[in-house]
Image (cartoon, grey):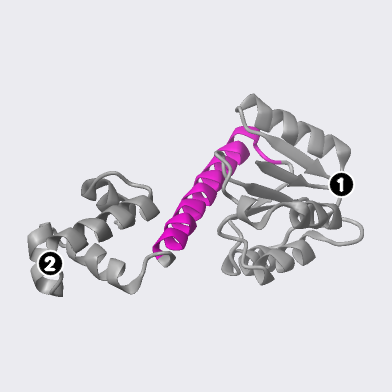
């Protein structure tokens, strides 16, 4: 989902149309607080986990809560990986851009912008969001493994057969098979090759 936070109706409408022309879902917000309120209303697990990922096009100068204040909120909440921010501004300066990029903004684009170049950057940001969501999902699955399952997992990833794993851990082959089945189930994979690819 492309989140467009800009107080100018014409800019929001144009960007929504551009996004839709590329097959991207988009939603506009007339101000920073409206965007944060909508974000708060979403389930926490939804951030960045849609099939398209998430990206925020954020105007710097808006009445009420400006873009920098919204960005600060996203930084504080640790959401930049799943919600990459592309700043849009007609009044940007170099120090502001450099500071924003150092603090984790995905890009800083000045108005008027090139439509295709901006949408290319949006698609790159959405790809980053998807990667961050996928990595987070893998970490969450790993966290469900028991200490013994982690030991078995490490030995499987090292290319050891069940018999070798059993010998190294001093357990029966049947126990290894049970752990292996639990690991595959929790990690949502069917083969050791798929598991290795997931954790590479």
State the mark number for residue 9. Answer: none
Q: Position of residue 185 (x, y in %)?
A: 36, 51
Most frequent secondary structure within the magenta stretch: helix
* 117 versus 184 height, above or below: above
> Is residue 40 covered in magenta?
no
Q: Residue at x 25, y 53 (%)?
A: 196
Q: Position of residue 110 (x, y in %)?
A: 70, 49
Most extreme residue toward the right is: 63
The magenta stretch is 113-142
Q: Position of residue 68 (x, y in %)?
A: 76, 64
* Spatial separation of the CA atoms under disc 1 and disc 2: 61 Å
User: Judging from the image, what secondary structure is the residue with disc 1 in?
Assistant: loop
| 41 on left or right of 53 | right
Question: In terms of depth relative to the viewer, which is nearer, 6 or 113?
Answer: 6
Answer whether residue 84 is visible to the viewer in this image: no
Mark 1 or 2, which is nearer the eye?
2
Question: In terms of depth relative to the viewer, which is nearer, 126 or 108?
Answer: 126
Location of the C terminus by quadrant is bottom left
Most extreme residue toward the top is: 21
Q: Which residue is mark 2?
A: 166
Q: Residue at x 74, y 54 (%)?
A: 39
* 73 versus 109 height, above or below: below
State the mark number for residue 30. Answer: 1
Answer whether residue 181 is visible to the viewer in this image: yes
Sequence-wise, the earlier of marks 1 and 2 is: 1
Q: Residue at x 8, y 70 (%)?
A: 167
> Is residue 124 covered in magenta?
yes
Location of the N terminus by quadrant is top right
Question: In terms of depth relative to the viewer, which is nearer, 33 or 182?
Answer: 182
Q: Residue at x 56, y 39 (%)?
A: 52
User: Judging from the image, what secondary structure is the residue with disc 2 in?
Assistant: helix
């Amino acid at each position: 989902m492309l989140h467009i936070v800009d107080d100018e109706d014409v800019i929001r409408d144009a960007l929504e149309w551009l996004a839709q022309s590329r097959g991207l879902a988009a939603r506009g917000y007339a101000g920073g607080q409206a965007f944060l309120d909508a974000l708060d209303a979403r389930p926490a697990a939804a951030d960045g986990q849609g099939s398209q990922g998430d990206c925020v096009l954020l105007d710097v100068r808006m009445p009420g809560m400006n873009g920098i204040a919204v960005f600060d909120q996203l930084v504080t909440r640790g959401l930049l990986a799943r919600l990459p921010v592309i700043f849009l501004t007609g009044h940007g300066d170099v120090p502001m851009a450099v500071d924003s990029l150092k603090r984790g903004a995905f890009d800083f684009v000045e108005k008027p912008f090139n439509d295709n170049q901006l949408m290319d950057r949006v698609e790159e940001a959405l790809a980053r969001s998807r990667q961050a969501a996928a990595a987070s999902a893998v970490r969450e699955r790993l966290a469900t493994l028991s200490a013994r399952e982690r030991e078995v997992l490490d030995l499987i990833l090292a290319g050891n057969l069940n018999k070798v794993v059993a010998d190294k851990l001093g357990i029966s082959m049947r126990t290894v098979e049970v752990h292996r089945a639990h690991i595959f189930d929790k990690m949502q994979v069917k083969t050791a090759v798929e598991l290795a690819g997931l954790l590479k």
